[in-house]
Amino acid sequence: QVRLVESGGGLVQPGGSLRLSCAASGFSFSSAVMTWYRQAPGKAREWVANIGTSGGIRNYVASVKGRFTISRDNAKNMVYLEMNNLNPEDTAVYYCNAGSMLAPRYSWGQGTQVTVSS
């Protein structure tokens, strides 16, 4: 059974930082491209960043490039999203999934809420 469990969200002031974690199980993690997504209130879910199987290839949506860093630990079946210089537009529920940006492979986990507010 596939499980995707996101954690690390919270309330942070503009300019602050958070590190999100995603624990994956039930599939061949080291063989999967992993992607972080987010869904803001009233908006469609969008991809934020993805990372190749070995971590050598990383892609970011333009709005987070230079502020967010995606990484993975294949030994622990974990994928991370380091988020710096956060702004209110980053407020959303963040999710991880396997697969390419436009083709998430599995059912969504519960996500982790990130709120950026003063």
Image: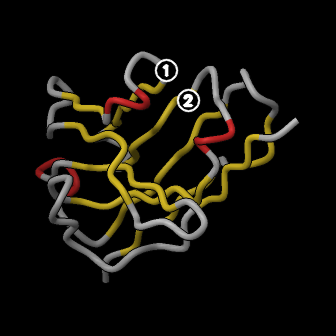
Q: Is residue 53 above or below residue 95?
A: above
Specify the label residue 67 is tagged with. Answer: 1
CB under 8 Å between discs 2 and 1: yes
- The one nearer the camera, 25 or 114, is 114
Q: Quadrant of the C terminus?
A: top right
Tell me the residue at 47%/53% (across/down).
22
Earlier in the chain: of badge 2 and badge 1, it is 1
Judge from the rendering whether residue 31 lies leftward or rightward of residue 36; answer left or right.
Answer: left
Q: Residue at x 68, y 39 (%)?
A: 88
Tell me which amino acid carries mark 1. Answer: Arg
> In this rendering, would 9 be left or right of 24?
right
Q: Quadrant of residue 111?
A: bottom right
Looking at the image, how many numbered discs can be counted on the residues? Answer: 2
Residue furthest bottom in the image: 1
- Mark sitting on residue 31: none
Q: Residue at x 22, y 55 (%)?
A: 29
* 58 or 89, nearer to the observer: 89
Please give the name of the residue rendered at 15% of the width and 54% of the height, measured from the top-left corner.
100
Question: In x, y percent, where is residue 4?
Answer: 42, 67
Dot label at residue 83: 2
Residue 64 on image: x %, y %: 43, 29
Label 2 SS: strand
Which quadrant would the N terminus be assigned to in this image? bottom left
Amino acid type, callout 2: Met
Question: Residue 80: image x %, image y %?
Answer: 45, 39
